[in-house]
Image (cartoon, rainbow, N blue to C red):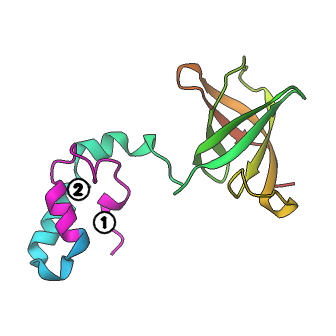
Amino acid sequence: MGDEYWENCPYAESDECPQSDAIVRVSIIPQLLDPADIDSIKQTCRTCGKYLDQKRKYPRIKRPLQIVLIKERQTAIKGNIVDLSEGGALIQLQTWADFKKDEKVLLEIYHSHPTSDKSSHELTKVSGLIKRIEAERQQLAIVFLSGAE
């Protein structure tokens, strides 16, 4: 396994997928399909232009992590981590403020739903620098300066 590209494709379960019926069959009843048909579906998914063009625009994490961004000891801004890697994160903010490239910020990352009681083990604080600003999408790319506190 490991090459089921439709599992991470944002189009696989929509009308925009060029082979949505085939993907449903191979996902639900692969044991009833001919192995050559399965290989053909995998090949089509592997080379699908929609998937290749869009795959980095979608989260690598299964569910968005809720964050609070603290900028220069000012009001905290709520948002979500859209994409996360070892060295940084792409975050989407609920409200927007003026940001500058290389500005230092503090991220508070919450591991559970915000309605639950927060305890110290459900919160991770990380400082970082803003490396990219996408004001129209209300997104910031942050590079982490240090590990969890």
> Does residue 107 appear left or right of residue 52 in this picture?
right
Q: Residue at x 87, y 25 (%)?
A: 74
| Dot 2 or dot 1, earlier in sequence | 1
Judging from the image, what secondary structure is the residue with disc 2 in? helix
Q: Residue at x 25, y 56 (%)?
A: 46
* Residue named by callout 1: 4
Considering only vertical position in the picture, is 124 above or below 101? below
Q: Could you tell me if the residues under marks 2 and 1 are in contact, i.e. CB atoms within 8 Å? A: yes
Quadrant position of residue 75: top right
Q: Residues within 10 Å of mark 1 (few under 14, many from 20)?
A: some
At label 2, the amino acid type is Cys
Q: Position of residue 89 (x, y in %)?
A: 64, 43
- In magenta stretch: residue 6: yes
Quadrant position of residue 90: top right
- In magenta stretch: residue 149: no
Considering only vertical position in the picture, is 11 above or below 76? below
Q: Which mark is residue 45?
A: 2
Quadrant of the frame with the C terminus: bottom right
